[in-house]
């Protein structure tokens, strides 16, 4: 197996683990509740979330780079982190992902499990919006790992 393949095989699962840690443990309640708001407050909350998220993913990849002597160039490292951060920000503004879901015929899935107006529904992690959000992130983490490995 080539060095790019080994680097990819190490970086992708590491990014997936770092993603789960950063998205669920590192993100603050304020960031989670505010990152989709319109205006500067929403943009700031989302940017703060993505900054801490990227700190986690960059740290994990950097540690593995050193520990395993991975074949990662500085350009590959930066591009991989930028792809991850920018696509994460885009999706976490929420209106953007809702727009994409509607555009691609997934609006019913996006709305699945969301609280209904006038009802005392209990929101959970099992919503369609959450599933689409996570699958979006995971697909871009695959791209980030590939770019990290080959650039």
Image (tube, rainbow, N blue to C red):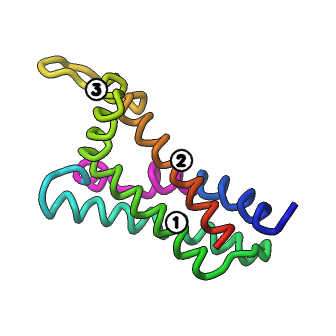
Q: What is the quadrant of the C terminus in the image? A: bottom right
The answer to whether residue 15 is magenta is no
Query: Residue 118's quadrant in the figure?
Result: top left
Label 1: few (<14), some (14–19) or many (≥20) C-alpha neighbours in 10 Å: many
| Magenta segment main secondary structure | helix
Q: What is the quadrant of the N terminus in the image? A: bottom right
Which mark's residue is nearer the viewer, 1 or 2?
2
The answer to whether residue 21 is magenta is yes
**Residue drawn 36% across the image and 25% down it:** 109
The answer to which of marks 2 and 3 sits earlier in the sequence is 3
In the rendered view, tell whether residue 31 sits above or below residue 110: below
Q: Residue furthest top?
A: 119
The answer to which of marks 1 and 3 sits earlier in the sequence is 1
The residue where tag 2 is placed is 138
The answer to which of marks 1 and 2 sits earlier in the sequence is 1
Going by the image, does 18 lie left or right of 127? Answer: right
Closest to the observer: 34 or 72? 72
Which mark's residue is nearer the viewer, 2 or 3?
2
The residue where tag 1 is placed is 56
Query: Residue 102's quadrant in the figure?
Result: top left
Q: Are marks 2 and 3 in contact (CB under 8 Å)?
A: no
Going by the image, does 103 lie left or right of 54? Answer: left
Q: Which residues are magenta?
A: 18-34
Describe the element under mark 3 as helix, strand or loop.
loop
Going by the image, does 20 lie left or right of 70? Answer: left
Q: Are marks 1 and 2 in contact (CB under 8 Å)?
A: no
Label 2: few (<14), some (14–19) or many (≥20) C-alpha neighbours in 10 Å: some
The residue where tag 3 is placed is 114
């Amino acid at each position: 197996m080539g060095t790019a393949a080994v680097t990819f095989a190490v970086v992708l699962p590491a990014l997936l683990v770092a993603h789960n840690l950063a998205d669920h443990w590192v993100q603050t309640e304020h960031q989670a509740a505010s990152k989709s708001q319109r205006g500067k407050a929403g943009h700031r909350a989302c940017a703060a979330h993505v900054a801490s998220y990227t700190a986690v993913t960059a740290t994990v990849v950097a540690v593995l780079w050193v520990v395993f002597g991975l074949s990662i160039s500085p350009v590959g490292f930066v591009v991989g982190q930028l792809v991850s951060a920018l696509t994460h920000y885009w999706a976490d503004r929420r209106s953007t992902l809702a727009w994409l879901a509607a555009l691609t015929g997934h609006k019913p899935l996006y709305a699945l499990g969301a609280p209904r107006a006038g009802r005392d529904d209990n929101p959970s992690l099992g919503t369609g919006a959450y599933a689409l959000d996570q699958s979006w992130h995971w697909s871009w983490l695959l791209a980030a790992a590939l770019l990290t490995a080959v650039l």
